[in-house]
Image (cartoon, rainbow, N blue to C red):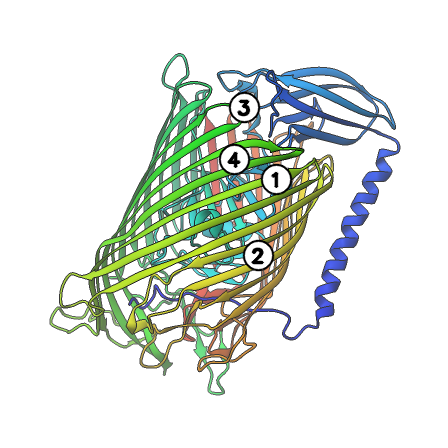
Amino acid sequence: MKHYRPYVKNRTGWLLHQPILYFQMKINIFSILLLLLISSTSFAQLSSGNLKGRIVTTKEEAVSGATVQLQQTAIKTQTDSDGNFSLDAIPPGTYVLVVSNIGYTALKQNLIITAGKNTFLNLQLSESKQELKEVAISTNKKRYQVKQSSSATRMDLRLLETPQSVQVVSSEVMQDKQAFTLNELSGTFTGMKANNGNGSFNMRGFTAYSPNDASFLLYNGIRGNLFLWSQQPLLYNVAAVELLRGPSGALFSEGAPGGVINFVTKKPLTESRYNIDLSLGSWKFRRASADLTGPLTKNKRLLYRAIIGYDRSESFRNGQDKENIFLAPSLTYLFSDKTSLHLEINYAHQKAVQQYDNGTFIRTRADGTFDFNYYPNNLTIQSPTDYGKTNNSSATLTLDHSFNEKLKLTVVQRAVRNVLDFTDHIPLGKIKNDSISRGYQDWETDRFSLQTTAYASYATKTGPFKHQVIVGADYNRFGWTKNDYQFKTSTRISIFNPDYSNDIPGADVPAEEADDNKRITNLAGFYVQDQVSFGRHLKALLSLRHDKYDGKETPLSARDNKQGDELQASGWIPRVGLVYLPIENISFYGTYLRSFNPQTSNNVLSGGPFPTRTASQYELGSKADFFHQQLSTTLSVYEIKYANILTAAPTEENSHRQAAIDGTRSRGIEFSASGTVQNFNVIAGYAYNEHLILSTSAYGKKGDRFANAPKHMANLWLKYNLYGTALKGLGIAGGVRYVSDQVGLISNQNFVFPEYTVLDAAINYQRGRYHIQFNAYNLTDKRYFTGSRSSTVSGGLGDPFNYRVGISYQIR
């Protein structure tokens, strides 16, 4: 249908060239490291004491997620779903124990720790109608470690108890890196990268890119992406970004097989706080934002938050210019301690020259090899007249009600609208004599998503077993009311001396392809989930979901090439997970996940109709919290089998052709760590992945690597904070990102982008209400390609050396 939107790249496979011993050696290395850490912890306990306990309410009900800390030390933890906590290897002495949680009055208690003695405490927290100021302030400290998330299970569980690989990046990390879009933040996640300057990402060897799907991006666990595939998602109102690895259909229905991204947005606070941020950088980058929050009534029942953002920048490429305006007002009304209503509205306007970045030219040598350094960075296939205008808006209404401590209900209504006016030039054929033929695209579309979600959670017991049951239903109506697209042949240009005078074909030139239609898809789903606790050490998670799709595409004129299309599909989606916690800070898990996704794009011109996509994943892993539980680690081994995945299969006559692969297999290992060790904040990760075709076809043979899927990716971000000196408030950081070589086109296994290593650095200074930041990216000015554009004539190019200076001021 569209020349650029179907470029759904995918990945590689398993150990094609390395023996299985290589895979086993990696597991053994991580196992040895894990045993060494456990052994060192056990040795330290011989000359220290331990503290365990349970936190409950005045009604003797468990308090999960409470912070338990020894005052004026870095020794702290959080309670699990049963209210239990454990602090190990505590030096002997006298301490003040502080227990706090939002919605409860903080508790302090003096205690003495004796070497070799295990102390156990039963403590109670009293409920409070308002969040404590001390707790609200503590959440604003520099923290890289996040121990809890509700996104994977819709239960407020510790990540240690979640049978799935989940990584959370907090707003503090975003600030330290001055990462303002998901593309800029993606390299912080283990095994994830942006394929280009738009909304295409690689996770576990699969490309997440959804021009027609309901998207792999969630907001507070609800479907409905605010941004289109041609844009980099903005992070103005985002408090944390969560990566849920693997198929997640049991709760969220369709999504990318490699994982889904969840944005946790900033909510109104009970205490007034006003913050202003300003940033300047390379290529005339300028950005300003304001974040205002607090109560609107004396009793603090009505709360507000208003986030306003503006940015504009050019590029290292010729002619590119982007301007964003972002507004995010929200209101929360606390009817009581048990009932709240939250309304959040988002509006994002973008005006851009060359909104959809089509990459940089790549030269093909006479012998068929490729010269990735021949053409300068600034050159592009696009024209100065190409533009993108988008108006995106969303409204989300959330009702939370607790009938009692056991039964809770959540109802969410989310509406999203995306309006796009877009023109673009794309390459046609091959480069000859430093010139290239081009196609012209003109597209106007008006898209929508209406999502209703309701789910109830109930805590109960059957004999000695505890159950946390969730029953829910979703209804999603999505599609477009306007889809007016035309593709015409444009002029051939000299790459070094382009003439853009006749770029736009005349109105009398007939379109080679055209769409003029509307489409509505109805998705109805229901699910049930049960987390069963077999005592404190063993937990099982069982889920089952059923989805039914009913879609229809209707032509609006004779110009429409398809002249109608229909979709009917249904299926069951199971999930089974098991978690074993031998001790409080270490867990082992195994999980089986499935997904079921219909092909929402069955365009005949693109090679359709296509069979339904299915994915299944097996995963084994271990999670642990070390260094007084301040450093969280995850080690996982997985296999994903995916059938009927769409991949680019271009021909000389049809550059946008797609095909469904009979079967692919992605296997890999991932290790990630995040948290604080003394004065250091750290995020580190390594991912190994191979994604292979399992059958031979006209465009690829069995064992071929998938496009845009590197075998190795590693990342490290380390920050040192100075405390208790004349330089108190100063922080120095450095980072490195490594990506191995990657096949750029599945039909040409010789088209391989070189490996690259990128170095970043930062320095910041906090003084009172002021925060000053300087970041430098790609210190060595490395030229590197991030991914393919479904042809061998161009590829996504990473940013050369650039910098940003930021200043933040908290007015109150």
Q: Tag 3, which secondary structure?
A: loop
Residues at circles 1 and 4 in contact by the CB criterion of under 8 Å: no
Q: Tag 1, which secondary structure?
A: strand
Whichever of callouts 3 and 1 sits on the residue coming sooner in the sequence is 3
Q: Marks 1 and 2, Cα distance to the nearest angstrom? A: 31 Å
Tell me the tag on residue 577. Answer: none
- The quadrant of the picture occupied by the N terminus is bottom left
User: Where 634 falls versus 757 (above or below)?
Assistant: above
Residue under label 1, please give it. Answer: 532
Residue under label 4, please give it. Answer: 772
Q: Where is residue 311 in the image (x, y as percent from the top left)?
A: 36, 43
Q: Tag 2, which secondary structure?
A: loop
Q: Marks 1 and 4, Cα distance to the nearest angstrom? A: 48 Å
Q: Residues within 10 Å of mark 4 (few under 14, many from 20)?
A: some
**Labels 1, 2: front one:** 1
Whichever of callouts 3 and 2 sits on the residue coming sooner in the sequence is 3
Residue 609 appears in the rendering? yes
Which kind of residue does numbered mark 2 sit on? Answer: Gly
Q: Nearer the viewer, residue 77 or 237?
A: 77
**Labels 3, 2: front one:** 3
Q: Marks 3 and 2, Cα distance to the nearest angstrom? A: 33 Å
Which kind of residue does numbered mark 3 sit on? Answer: Ile
**Labels 1, 4: front one:** 1
Which kind of residue does numbered mark 1 sit on? Answer: Val
Q: Position of residue 717 (x, y in %)?
A: 61, 48
Instruction: Say left or right for 229 vs 709.
Output: left
Instruction: Say left or right for 516 vs 283.
Output: left
Q: Marks 2 and 4, Cα distance to the nearest angstrom? A: 31 Å
Residues at circles 1 and 2 in contact by the CB criterion of under 8 Å: no
Residue under label 3, please give it. Answer: 102
